[in-house]
Image: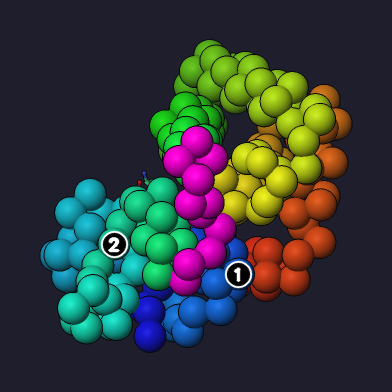
């Protein structure tokens, strides 16, 4: 059994989808970020950086509890545990890792910046900057996906699982959403047909 600490944002949804796809038993816990539940000493024992998602696998390595935070680390761990969605071939595996990193270290912080300066500490010029940079980055994904069904090779992988909530959730905060990116939109519509993706996206949805 896995305990999942989460919220229904793009980062949380990546792990909801992965757990549903892998068919692993889990108990989801909705965190109250507004109330600061993630900043309590108890939660910081799980993630010292006070962020979600976090999992606690009660059947971890060595048959003991194992705490994992950081979305891409959780995705890799669950892929290894389930033996799914991460190719064995070294080139393809590295490409999957490359896309995990690209999305989470380049695009994730742009949407975080947009959210912070639009909703938490309003600064109009900063919002414009982050929106423009996020649009540029989605344009790159759009071009890359022009002739592809999945991010890597011919198979669905954690690269797709990690990118999907960015297209389905984060992009809604951009003035034109996914409209300027037809290839990204086609790719996302295909991923959205998967029942596990639908279940993952519904978890704690508002
Ligand atoms: N690098 C982290 C980012 C996680 C993250 O930013 N989580 C947000 C929710 S989507 C959070 O916990 N925010 C609380 C805060 O910043 O105080 C990951 O990939 O898991």
The reply, left or right, for residue 203 in relation to residue 77 is right
Magenta stretch holds residue 87: yes
Q: Which of marks 2 and 1 is in front?
A: 1
Give me the residue at 56% from left, 58% from top. Answer: 85
The kind of secondary structure element at disc 1 is helix
The residue closer to the viewer here, 15 or 97, is: 97
The kind of secondary structure element at disc 2 is strand
Q: Mark 1 points at which residue?
A: 21
Q: Main secondary structure of the magenta part?
A: loop
Dividing the picture into quadrants, the one containing residue 141 is top right
Question: Can residue 135 be seen at all in this image of the molecule?
Answer: no
Q: Tags 2 and 1 in contact by the CB under 8 Å rule?
A: no
Q: Give the range drawn in magenta.
A: 82-92
Q: Residue furthest front?
A: 89
The reply, left or right, for residue 46 in relation to residue 184 is left
Between the C-alphas of marks 2 and 1, the distance is 18 Å
Q: Name the residue under label 2.
A: 68
The yes-or-no answer for disc 2 within 8 Å of ligand 1 is: no
Give me the residue at 55% from left, 72% from top. Answer: 22
| Quarter containing the N terminus | bottom left
| Quarter containing the C terminus | bottom right
The residue closer to the viewer here, 177 or 162, is: 162
How would you rate the neighbour count of disc 1 (Cα within 10 Å): few for under 14, some for 14-19, many for 20 or more?
many
Q: Residue 72 carries which label?
A: none
Give me the residue at 31% from left, 76% from top. Answer: 57
């Amino acid at each position: 059994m896995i305990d999942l600490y989460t919220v229904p944002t793009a980062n949380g949804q990546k792990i909801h989808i992965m757990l549903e796809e892998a068919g692993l038993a889990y108990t989801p816990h909705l965190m109250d970020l507004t109330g600061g539940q993630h900043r309590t000493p108890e939660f910081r024992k799980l993630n010292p950086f006070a962020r979600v998602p976090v999992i606690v696998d009660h059947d971890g390595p060595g048959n003991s509890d194992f705490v994992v935070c950081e979305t891409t680390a959780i995705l890799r761990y669950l892929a290894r545990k389930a033996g799914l969605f991460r190719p064995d071939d070294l080139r393809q595996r590295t490409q999957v890792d490359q896309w995990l990193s690209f999305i989470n270290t380049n695009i994730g912080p742009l949407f975080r910046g947009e959210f912070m300066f639009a909703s938490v500490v309003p600064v109009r010029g900063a919002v414009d900057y982050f929106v423009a940079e996020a649009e540029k980055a989605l344009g790159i994904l759009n071009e890359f996906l022009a002739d592809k069904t999945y991010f890597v090779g011919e198979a669905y992988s954690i690269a797709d699982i990690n990118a999907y909530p960015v297209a389905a959730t984060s992009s809604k905060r951009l003035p034109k959403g996914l409209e300027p990116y037809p290839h990204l939109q086609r790719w996302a519509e295909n991923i959205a047909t998967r029942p596990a993706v639908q279940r993952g996206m519904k978890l704690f949805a508002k």
